Image (cartoon, helix red, strand yellow):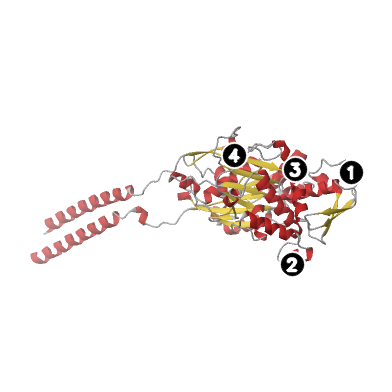
Amino acid sequence: MFAHKKHFTNAIIGALVALSIIALVLSLVDIEDVTLPPTVKYGMVFDAGSSHTSLFVYEWDSDKENDTGVVSQTLSCEVQGQGISSYANDPPKAGDSLRECLDKALKVVPAAKQRDVPAYLGATAGMRLLREQNSSVADQVLAEVAKTMREYPVAFKGAQILTGEEEGAYGWITINYLLDSFTKVGEGQTNILGALDLGGASTQISFMPRSSVINWNDTSKLTLYGYNYNIYTHSYLCYGQNEMLKRLAKELIESFSSTRIDHPCYPKDYNETVSLSSFRTSPCTNQSDPRLTHGNRNVTLEGRGNASGCLAAIKKLFNFSACSQSQDCTFDGVYQPPVSGQFIAFSAFYYNFKFLNLTEGQSLATVRETIKHFCTRSWEDVRSPQWENPERLPKYCANANYILTLLLDAYKFNETSWNNIFFQMKAGRADIGWTLGYMLNLTNMIPAEAPVQMKGHVPSLWAAAVTFIVLTLALGLAALLLLLWV
């Protein structure tokens, strides 16, 4: 009987010792080795541009939201119709136009998270022009889109018109965030990229100049992840591609009194009829020659496919003489330090060059020759790609020559620095544009201080110590009771 109890006691003690060792080993496992489901957060931003509106939905792991490059794009949705500024005569339709994309967004965001999703609408140059024309109407349009967004189960944070400089700065943040440039600065690398954005009504340039810049504004001074960035950013209203095309047509018409006007940038055998009243709908073209202010007569623009004539006509849209040969001036007397570093050219820069197969790092000589050749093609040849929007086809010659003029004559890129421009629309896990940088800023996801990298080993050590002590006491108590029982 005594031997049986002794063996039983030894077995119990052995089992407790084994359990104690197993518990100790398990408790020493680093907490980082345990995979826990991430807490995913979402955000959405409407880009209300001059020609169209797009919705972008982003997601990220909240445990890493202060790191760079962790936000990915879950959805992009093109709103049907034109930009919200086109609804000036019927503001409620501006709000209604957003519903289809909002419905799609709610299908990708889990229902339990929807009311926590920050939702923004940022309007750019189209609404800046409308505000310049009629501020009360612009306010009505914004009120209607805000009214619609409040009907949805999201955390609506407001609809506002961005300044051109804000648009440029947020695009610059987006590019460098997606490409982890801010992190590389911390590793001793300073490859911060510049941003070139071309929209329908404005264009922006943003970069870090090598020399000091005069007249800094608040938009130009940024503190991100523990580093100070002084960037040059400028926006040119009325120099987006759509407004440029209107201004070009107006200049051609003012040069002749006929109702049939040669258009050097349009393909041969292509004709377009425009009403003179259309030039009075935008502040960019409403200061017209007296011949354009009377009546609503129509004028026919007849394509001539004249490459050199097209380039010459486009250069007349810029006032280069206002700079007096200064290297720190672009056009219209606007100050700009010399371009430096590498640039990402996106939006219409990318789309126009993509159509012409010029986004693969071609030399400047090749780019010029390709554009020249395209501009001499007939309308029958140009419209052969059936997949392309026929409304865009006759405009590629003018757009491409405009891009060349803007980059070379205005911003002063040259044969060498041209190779530092990369035409692309995506980086990392999202489209390039101002919307991501805008959301990152408003949600405070980019801290001014450098993020602290903390390891999760402390809880494991405490767990090991506590578990070991408790099991040791339990083992001692059990052994004492067993010995008394024996």
Residue at mark 2:
384
Distance of mark 1 from mark 4, alpha carbons? Answer: 40 Å
- Look at the numbered disc 2 and give the secondary structure of its residue: loop
Residue at mark 1:
291
Distance of mark 3 from mark 2, alpha carbons? Answer: 37 Å
User: Residue at the location (46% across, 46% down)?
Assistant: 189
User: Is there any visible trace of residue 57 in the rendered image?
Assistant: yes
Distance of mark 3 from mark 1, alpha carbons? Answer: 25 Å
Considering every residue shown, the one lying at the far left of the view is: 2
Q: List x then y, in percent, for residue 59.
A: 53, 53
Task: Look at label 4 and name its amino acid.
Answer: Tyr
Task: Look at label 2 and name its amino acid.
Answer: Ser
- Look at the numbered disc 1 and give the secondary structure of its residue: helix
Q: Residues within 10 Å of mark 2 (few under 14, many from 20)?
A: few
Q: Is 6 left, or right, of 170 in this rendering?
A: left
Quadrant (top left, top right, bottom left, bottom right) of the C terminus: bottom left
Label 1 or label 4, whichever comes before in sequence order: 4
Q: Are marks 2 and 4 in contact (CB under 8 Å)?
A: no
Label 1 or label 2, whichever comes before in sequence order: 1
Give the quadrant of residue 34. bottom left
- Look at the numbered disc 3 and give the secondary structure of its residue: helix
User: Residue at the location (77% across, 43% down)?
Assistant: 284
Q: List x then y, in percent, for residue 184.
A: 46, 47
User: Residue at the location (78% across, 63% down)?
Assistant: 378
| Residue 232 numbered mark, or none | 4
Task: Look at label 3 and name its amino acid.
Answer: Leu
| Residue 130 numbered mark, or none | 3
Q: Residues within 10 Å of mark 3 (few under 14, many from 20)?
A: many
Q: Nearer the viewer, residue 324 or 87?
A: 324
Q: Nearer the viewer, mark 3 or mark 1?
A: 1
